[in-house]
Amino acid sequence: MIRCIKNPDIVKATVYWMMMAGLYSTMGTWYPTFFAETMGWPLSFAALIVSVNAVTGIPSGPIGGKISDKMGSRKLVLWVSALTLVFAYMLPLIIRNLYLLIIDMILIGVFATLPNGPINALLVDMVGTSLAGTGIGIICLGASIGSTWSPIIFGTLKDVTKAWNYSFHTLGIMGLIAFTSATLIKEEKKRT
Amino acid sequence: MAVGAVVMAFSRNYVELAIARFLMGVGASLTPPSFIAVLPEWFPQNQHGLILGCPVAAYNMAAFTAFAASALAPLYGWRTYIWCVAVIPPLIGLILSTIVLRGRVGVAERE
């Protein structure tokens, strides 16, 4: 376990997954309320629109893994997803059109689940199969911390500032942290 | 998770419900590291991305059971569904650990 924690690339992958999980959890927690408040939709309809991302996320997990297998690079999928999500998570702040918002939810669903396969595979590449369980446990711990605190920070900012802008900017910052962590990961290029 | 579900099915107040949810959370969080540790041993490195991405698709598909449960809950009561959680996942776990894992070990031994 200590070997895993001391590995700087595991730390970077954990930070990445912490931010990504935090972003996704914040979306699930706050977007329906945000849409209900700003668009005037019933909360059930707003939740339905947000849940579109769960459907589009079904094929993208295996597809993201397949892309990383074909390209021989795991982190490329990670940083492309993070960069796309920086914009996708912040777009609801400026979009006021139902269809565009649905497209945005589809994008979020695709790019939030795209890195799942590559990040787990990257971890196995880093520590080998014998320590994969420990490494993935550490990453999952980071994800749990991110998904617990991110919605709280988002909501607190909303309450303190009485506006949604600052909360959404936090999502952008989190996406950029994920992007930076992914680009800093050193991966083994050679594949068997 | 099954123990947590049983506790939840019998819960009478908020504290018991919170304890049950905690137990279920512990059980659920143990699952991903264990199967993600097992899967790479069965497949070559150039298939790890695909293989480790498949459980995510399964998670998202399983989320639709929540819709079914919420639609049918008024008919049978929420405790009925929690009993399903107490019974179905351990059964699946048992099937996986006996049939799938042993079958795979058998294949590996023959190879």
Image (tube, coloured by chain):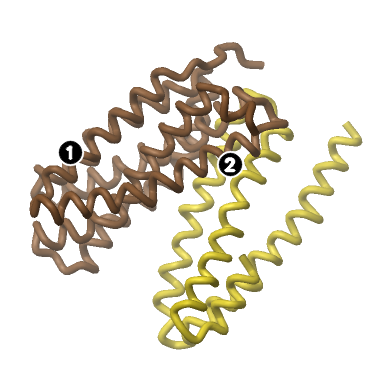
Chain colours: A brown, B yellow
- Determine which quarter of the picture holds residue B93: bottom right
What is the x, y in percent for residue A38?
Answer: 9, 57
Side of A164 relative to A109 (left or right) = left
Residue designated by label 1: A169
Q: Count up the numbered dots.
A: 2
Which amino acid does the dot numbered 1 rest on?
A: His
What is the x, y in percent for residue B97?
Answer: 77, 54
**Residue A149 or residue A90, whichever sits in front:** A149
Mark 1 or mark 2: whose residue is earlier in sequence: 2
Side of A39 relative to B59 (left or right) = left
Q: Chain of mark 1?
A: A
What is the x, y in percent for residue A23?
Answer: 32, 43
**Residue A161 or residue B1, whichever sits in front:** A161
In the structure shown, which secondary structural element does the residue marked by tag 2 occupy?
Answer: helix
CA distance separating discs 1 and 2: 30 Å
Compared to A51, does A21 lie above or below? above
What is the x, y in percent for residue B100?
Answer: 77, 50
Side of A134 relative to A182 (left or right) = right
Residue designated by label 2: A137
**Residue A119 or residue A110, whichever sits in front:** A119
At x 34%, y 46%, the residue is A24
Which amino acid does the dot numbered 2 rest on?
A: Gly
At x 58%, y 73%, the residue is B5
Label 2, residues with CA under 10 Å away: few <14, some 14-19, many ≥20: many
Marks 1/2 same chain? yes
Tell which residue pokes out farthest to the top in this image. Answer: A190
